[in-house]
Image (cartoon, helix red, strand yellow):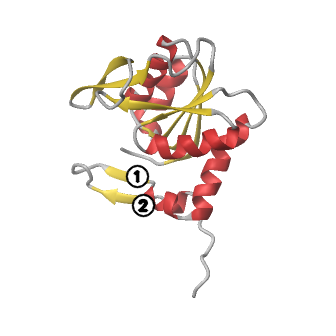
Amino acid sequence: MEPRRHVALKESIRSIPDYPKPGIIFRDITTLLSDPRSFRRAVDSLVHPYAGGRIDQVAGIEARGFILGGAVAHQLSSGFVPIRKKGKLPHTTVKIAYALEYGTDEMEIHVDAVKPGDRVLLVDDLIATGGTATAAVNLLRQIGAEVIAACFVIDLPDLGGAQRLRDLGVTVRTLMEFEGH
């Protein structure tokens, strides 16, 4: 059996051209997740700035944010809060509408997912235009959370999403950048 070679974190991302439509390069983290060393390095890098500090909850955006956020919450000994698409949570929810490239969508969180003043770290795989992440921050703030930071594996800086979050007063941490869409 051939030993696994050490792969740089950025090299563990699969790029898929023309998905979901022509001109878009989809940055697929499933290849990072399937490589134990890359997955561990990504989680450790997301956790590092907050280790030893007080993070009450980690909020993950559906769906890849659940995978990363759950691992980050475990490492920080924090709780985990899912932010889901409309209609997926069983208890009383608070929802927010947000703009997509074509149309709108809604996301929800349980009304009692955080206590007022809870220090929350938002986690997802990628920040592009920032529409979903901005909505998640606003949703968390609506139920009383103090959003400490938003962390992403990938930033697409040409699309301006990270800056949109910074404009809301949110610290943004990303592990890598890719040009374009």
Mark 1 lies on residue: 27
Quarter of the image where the N terminus is located: bottom right
Q: Is residue 113 visible?
A: yes
Q: On the rendered image, what quadrant is the C terminus found in?
A: top left
Q: Secondary structure at mark 1?
A: strand
User: Is the Cβ of the residue at disc 1 closer than 8 Å to that at disc 2?
Assistant: yes
Local secondary structure at mark 2: strand
Q: CA distance from mark 1 to mark 2?
A: 6 Å
Image quarter of residue 76: top right
Give the x, y percent position of residue 175: 59, 46
Note whether residue 155 is visible.
no
In terms of sequence position, does the residue under pointer 1 or pointer 2 come before the other? Answer: 2
Q: Which residue is mark 2?
A: 14
Residue 80 vertical placement versus 22 (above, below): above
Relative side of 96 to 136, left or right: left
x%, y% of residue 13? 47, 58
Tell how many labels.
2
Give the camera-side residue of 122 and 58.
58
